[in-house]
Image: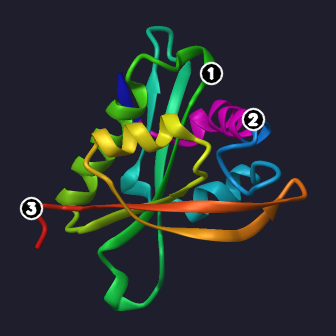
Amino acid sequence: MVVPLTAEHADQVLAIYRTGIDEGHATFETGPPAWEDFDAGKLPGHRFVALDGSGSVLGWVAASRVSDRCAYAGVVEHSVYVHPAARGRGLASVLLGELIRSTERAGIWTIQAGIFPENGASLAVHRRAGFRVIGTRERVGRHRGVWRDVVLVERRSPVVV
């Protein structure tokens, strides 16, 4: 079941985020933010969790503004994370589908993300969800002492024009 991500999910969402950080191929971040910072940085209408039958969080997706400039009002950046024990069940696809529906209803025309090229599973799920690679930022940042590339992906809405 997919429901809006709220404060009641905070501990589990941040734990899943911590796992992704620790695995080393999800983000440049070195630790999850405090819930208040996470909450303030994510758009309320565009964040969701996938729950199991007992209400435990299996994964989450959330979008943030890319800019305060009005020209970018229809562009968001997103993150999607799935608990390691829940991977391979299509949850990332389900979560991305919910994000796509919510953003299109809101008139958002572009969803984008930066993905490490080593994260083949994320690149594949994004491709299946209609994202395309628009380029690679080479050696854009150091992560754990190593220069890392980031593959930029975007999905342009076919209904918001």
Q: Which residues are magenta?
A: 4-20
Task: Give the Cα distance between marks 3 and 2.
Answer: 36 Å
Residue in front for this viewpoint, 124 or 36? 124
Give the amino acid at mark 2. Answer: Glu
Say the numbered circle drawn on residue 84: 1
Task: Give the Cα distance between marks 3 and 1.
Answer: 33 Å
Q: Do the residues under discs 2 and 1 have CB atoms within 8 angstroms?
A: yes
The reply to whether residue 111 is in sight is yes
Q: Quadrant of residue 48?
A: top left
Q: Residue sitting at 47 percent across and 59 percent down? A: 113
Say the numbered circle drawn on residue 23: 2
Q: Residue sitting at 58 percent across and 34 percent down? A: 8
Dominant secondary structure, magenta: helix
Give the amino acid at mark 3. Answer: Val
Q: Nearer the viewer, mark 3 or mark 2?
A: 2
Q: Quadrant of residue 71?
A: bottom left
Q: Residue sitting at 79 percent across and 37 percent down? A: 22
Residue 6 is one of the magenta-drawn residues: yes
Quarter placement of the C terminus:
bottom left
Give the amino acid at mark 1. Answer: Pro
Residue 154 is one of the magenta-drawn residues: no
Residue in front for this viewpoint, 115 or 10? 115
The image shows a total of numbered marks equal to 3
Residue 128 spot, x, y in % from top left = 29, 39
Residue 146 spot, x, y in % from top left = 84, 58
Q: Secondary structure at mark 2?
A: helix
Q: Do the residues under discs 3 and 2 have CB atoms within 8 angstroms?
A: no
Q: Secondary structure at mark 3?
A: loop
